Amino acid sequence: MFFQGLALSFVSSMAWCVLFNVPVRTIFAGGLAGMVGFCVYSLLPSLGAEVLLSTFASAAIVSLLSQFLSILLRVPSTNFSVAGIIPLVPGSLAYKSMLAFVNNNYVEGITLATKTLMVAGAIASGLIFGISVVTIWKGARYAGKRTQRD
Amino acid sequence: MSPDLVMDTCLLAGSIILKNGGETYRTEETMALIAEAAGMDDVNSSATPTSIILSFRCSGLDHTRMVRTPKRTTNLNKITLVNDVSRRFVGGKINLEQAYRLLRQIDQEKPIYPIWLQHAAAATASGSFAMLAGGTWFDLIPSALAGLTVNLSLEFLEQFVRMKFFTEFSAALLGGLFALLAVTIFPQLHISIIIIGAMLPLFPGIAITNSLRDLLAGDLVAGVSRGVEAMLTAVSVAVATAIILWVG
């Protein structure tokens, strides 16, 4: 079941890469980013993490990996991060909340909608975390070089 | 170097990036880097998701131009290529005429993946996402076909309807109707899984990522407007899903 999930996340991320016309040499790396993100996402709950924490952690890892791959392959990091977050999209939560609203179950609908928004926020903050870490690292490296030169 | 050619090159690079789904801060940065590497003074560039303004000073004369990019698609390959050209020009490996010619070529290029492959990719993404959301192997094919329906109708409707959100709404509605049809014919399928898979091609991934990166780069106007774009897409998909659930 776990390995089936890994394969499916790899395939869906790669398909998204094709949908966004990424360069041919980066398709596999995009699939890899999605697979690593899903791996973290499905392993963390067994260590006792909640869904928000595991979403945040996997989005952060996808973002860090995208930045690393973008330096390695010399392409913009959007190529990887867009496809990498696809397996984390809270599709079933959003669906369940719409279902509750349609069935006049407003309290449950609002609860689920809030949960969906929080998962989306966790993905966003994970992406922000990865970008910020790499920016700080680059800035520190640049500052180090400058002090050496002066 | 003639300032007109510098201006043309910068604006071409910027509009290719903006037209093909690049971030606003990348547009501004690329234009400023090219203009500065070409020896222009006092370079200022400003971009919103739909327009670019660039101004610089060359031998005592100010030059300012603005272009609009109303039509936008997603082609990350072109952004990578433009990035490459600007890096080579700034590094001194090619001159301005070569850079301009390369950019013209990039602008004319067709998408690297043919349209049937894109539809196949949308179907694959939908099918495998539906499986990830907890579907059985039987749900794979109908979800893939529903995703294909969504993507095909998106492409078809875009030619006639200029409103992006209405196009997405109609595509989501058609995909949902396909899911309803599939469940009516084969009652053992799960409609929830098929609808979750079908809506995946409409997920505003590029808008969300670009909005975050623009916000982080301090481009608040562009970041907020991209964020609103992503939210409107999500709302139109949600409303379409609600209508389908209400009918079904």
Image: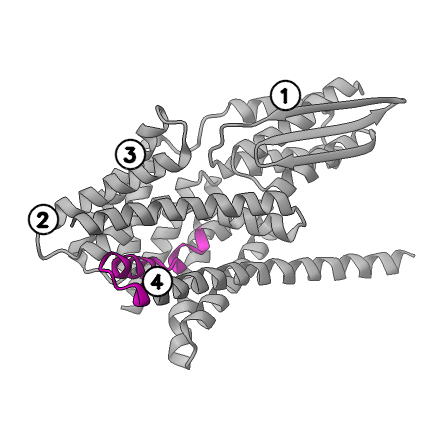
Q: Chain of mark 2?
A: B
Q: Which mark is residue B152?
A: 3
At horizontal 41% and vertical 68% (from top left) the residue drawn is A41
Q: Which residue is mark 4?
A: A6
Check whether the beta carbons of the residues at disc 4 and disc 2 lie within 8 A of each other: no
Q: Count residues near mark 1 (Cα–Cα under 10 Å), then give few for <14, some for 14-19, many for 20+.
A: few
At horizontal 70% and vertical 62% (from top left) the residue drawn is A137
Q: Count residues near mark 4 (Cα–Cα under 10 Å), then give few for <14, some for 14-19, many for 20+.
A: many
| Quarter assignment of residue B130 | bottom left
Cα–Cα gap, marks 2 and 1: 56 Å
Check whether the beta carbons of the residues at disc 1 and disc 3 lie within 8 A of each other: no
- Compared with B211, B47 (above or below) is above
Look at the image and say whether residue A97 sits in the magenta stretch: yes
State whether the magenta stretch is mostly helix, strand or loop: helix
Amino acid type at mark 1: Arg
Which sits earlier in the primary sequence, circle 2 or circle 3?
Answer: 3
- Which span of residues is magenta-colored? A83-109
Q: Are marks 4 and 2 on the same chain?
A: no
Q: Are marks 1 and 3 on the same chain?
A: yes
Rendered location of residue B52, percent (x, y):
65, 30
Rendered location of residue B118, percent (x, y):
35, 37
Frontmost residue, B167 versus A11: B167
Badge 4 marks a residue whose secondary structure is: helix
